[in-house]
Image: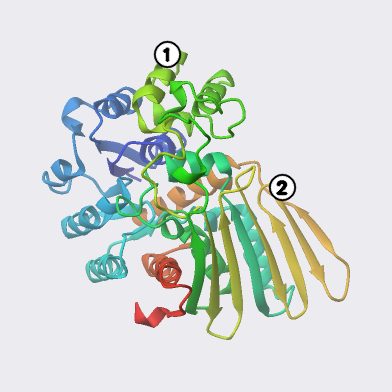
Amino acid sequence: MKPVTVAIAGCGSRGQDTYAACQERFGDRMRIVAAADIRPEKLKQMQERFGLTPAQCYNSAESMLQDGKIADVMFICTPDRMHYSEAMEALRLGYHLLLEKPIAPTPQQCLDIEREATQRGLHVVVCHVLRYTVFYQTLKQLIDEGRVGEVVSIQAIERVAHWHQAHSFVRGNWRNAGLSTPMILQKCCHDMDILLWLCGKRCLRVSSFGSLRHFNAQNAPKGAPERCTNGCPAADSCPYNAERFYLGKLRENSTGWPLNVLTTEFTEEAVLEALHHGPYGRCVYRCDNDVVDHQVVNLELEDGATINFTMCAFTKDCARHLRIMGTAGEIVADMQQNTIDVLPFMGENEHIDVTTLTSDFSGHGGGDARLLEDFLDLVQQTGQSKALTSITHSVESHLAALAAEESRLNAGRVVELNQL
């Protein structure tokens, strides 16, 4: 079987280090034939790592698209607000798409991409990788088997982690909704998708509250400079000290994400240079961020079941935890610990250690590579694909997230999804 040829738009942490890297894992299934990025150093990495020629490298996604259809599929891993125009043009050219979330910033743009793909008979797989983890697949199986009866309510939390908030949503690419997308969409369309998938029910209406409470100028320590590298008097006591955090990663030899977002050279000099002059050395209280640092979302489903979801920056670690309450029992699940406890109202409790079910927890609990493998199955039409997700399912999760943001901006007003 011929390998699927791939053109990649956006060669950063997700485009290169996650999806392109899968060629090294199952290279007989895919072959990268083109790459686009505005950063010359990223294109140089793609040439060296995947054997691309200068002619196969483009300085923008637009210039690559101008050359017409040069591969079977396109991976779109560019900034959020570029997705719509790039996806629409790629679909018109006949590409199947692996599209990094979020699909697009507005409900209409999400629906446009869905309609274009459907009319042209093309696959668009949005990177809702949590569906592909053994952790969530086990939860789905337990629910579908009726182990806790009918699901009545779910409580779920995404613990973003204080350092992840600072890196991505205060200093980083997703700090400002006008430049990217609202945090509840960018970060938690994952969660909207997985929660609706677990329930197998449609969402009717949403309400939400949240704000940017902490990461603003009024909470800056006295005398704090614009940058952590400028001799901050609170350096020893501040949990967001950029020098301590990023140099600490370097000294631990942890050169993957998030350190690889700062620099391609993993030396102390290169990291300090990035902190002195780039966005990641800024004081977290003196940035141009406007996205929330905590938000709660309430969803009502079509049969009256409810979901309560919390996203919060103020946690020590990145993790997801949920409690699923049904008519015959409940399930308590912790993705950080990789444990699932089934607690029926009658009968014996069951403890499931997910680490005994798989050895692959790379990239979102193993979901990254499994999603890409499923996408290749779809394109090659092997008949083996589980087709765990589709553009239609992804649009629904995005509408729920966008409804939550509309509600939050309007003092928690209930938003009906059919209004979107």
Q: What is the spatial separation of the Cα atoms under label 2 and label 1, in whole angstroms?
A: 36 Å
Residue 58 placement: quadrant: top left
Q: Residue 337: give its label.
A: 2
Picture coordinates of residue 309, whole percent (x, y): 58, 65
Badge 2 amino acid: Gln
The answer to whether residue 170 shows anywhere in this view is: yes
Residue at screen point 34% across, 77% down:
420
**Between discs 2 and 1, the one toward the N terminus:** 1
168 lies above or below 224: below
266 lies above or below 42: above
Task: Report the front residue among 187 and 24.
Answer: 187
The residue wearing badge 1 is 269
* Residue furthest front in the image: 222
Residue at screen point 17% across, 48% down:
69
Picture coordinates of residue 367, whole percent (x, y): 53, 49
Q: How many labels does the image show?
A: 2
Residue 24 placement: quadrant: top left
Within 10 angstroms of label 2, few (less than 14), some, or many (20 or more) residues?
A: few
Picture coordinates of residue 361, whole percent (x, y): 60, 42
Badge 1 amino acid: Glu
Q: What element carries label 1?
A: helix
Looking at the image, residue 227 sits to the left or right of residue 277; the answer is: right
Q: Residue 12: give its label.
A: none
In this rendering, the label closer to the viewer, 2 or 1: 1
Residue at screen point 59% across, 55% down:
158
Within 10 angstroms of label 1, few (less than 14), some, or many (20 or more) residues?
A: few
Looking at the image, residue 353 sits to the left or right of residue 67; the answer is: right
Looking at the image, residue 10 sits to the left or right of residue 93; the answer is: right
The answer to whether residue 381 shows anywhere in this view is: no
Q: What element carries label 2?
A: loop
